């Protein structure tokens, strides 16, 4: 197998393992009732699922054995849409956006805060803040699970294709 094919094969294999993690977290999350008092566990599982799902689509350090950031080409997008519906790619982009703007990084728009200027004490200050809560996002976790499974299936197929090409 040439070096570039070997790198793509390795990156795809790593991505499949990341998706396996996301799928496990989402299966467990979907077992917990939405109205459960276990909101910390639900929140942690959802954050972990988003992080694991997003890994294949975020940059990674260059390595001689694995490189690249998988992106959905038109064929992959069509396959995923055929499997789970037209809204799949928009949902995928929303997950990546949540990871980038609210989970891995705390952008102001997702975590607004401001200082109150009318604070009566001379040496003090008071802020008003709203911390981002992943459970407040209207996120269909059952659909998220279907998306993760569909993306994994596409990547498994790609892995077999890469393996054939490298012989």
Image: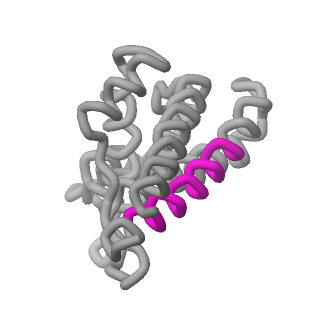
| Residue ID at (29%, 48%) | 71
Which residue is depicted at the point 35% across and 15% down? 86
The quadrant the N terminus occupies is: bottom left
The colour scheme of the drawn protein is one colour
Front residue of 68/61: it is 68
Please name the residue shown 73% across and 47% down the image.
Answer: 41
Q: Which residues are magenta?
A: 8-25
Is 24 colored magenta in this rendering?
yes
Magenta-colored stretch includes residue 107: no
Q: Is residue 18 left or right of residue 62?
A: right
Q: Position of residue 81 (x, y in %)?
A: 38, 20
Pick the front one: 7 or 121: 7
Q: Is residue 28 left or right of residue 88?
A: right
Q: Position of residue 78 (x, y in %)?
A: 33, 24
Q: Residue at x 48, y 57 (%)?
A: 163
Q: Position of residue 164 (x, y in %)?
A: 46, 53
């Amino acid at each position: 197998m040439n070096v570039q094919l070997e790198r793509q094969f390795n990156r795809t294999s790593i991505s499949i393992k990341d998706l396996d993690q996301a799928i496990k977290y989402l299966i467990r999350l979907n077992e917990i009732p939405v109205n459960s008092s276990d909101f910390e566990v639900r929140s942690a599982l959802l954050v972990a699922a988003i992080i694991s799902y997003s890994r294949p689509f975020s940059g990674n350090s260059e390595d001689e054995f694995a490189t690249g950031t998988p992106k959905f080409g038109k064929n992959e997008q069509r396959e995923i849409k055929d499997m789970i519906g037209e809204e799949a790619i928009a949902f995928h982009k929303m997950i990546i956006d949540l990871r980038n703007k609210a989970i891995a990084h705390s952008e102001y728009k997702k975590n607004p805060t401001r200082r109150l200027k009318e604070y009566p004490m001379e040496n003090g200050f008071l802020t008003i803040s709203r911390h981002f809560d992943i459970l407040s996002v209207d996120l269909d976790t059952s659909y998220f699970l279907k998306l993760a499974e569909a993306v994994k299936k596409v990547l498994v197929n790609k892995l077999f294709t890469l393996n054939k090409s490298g012989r």
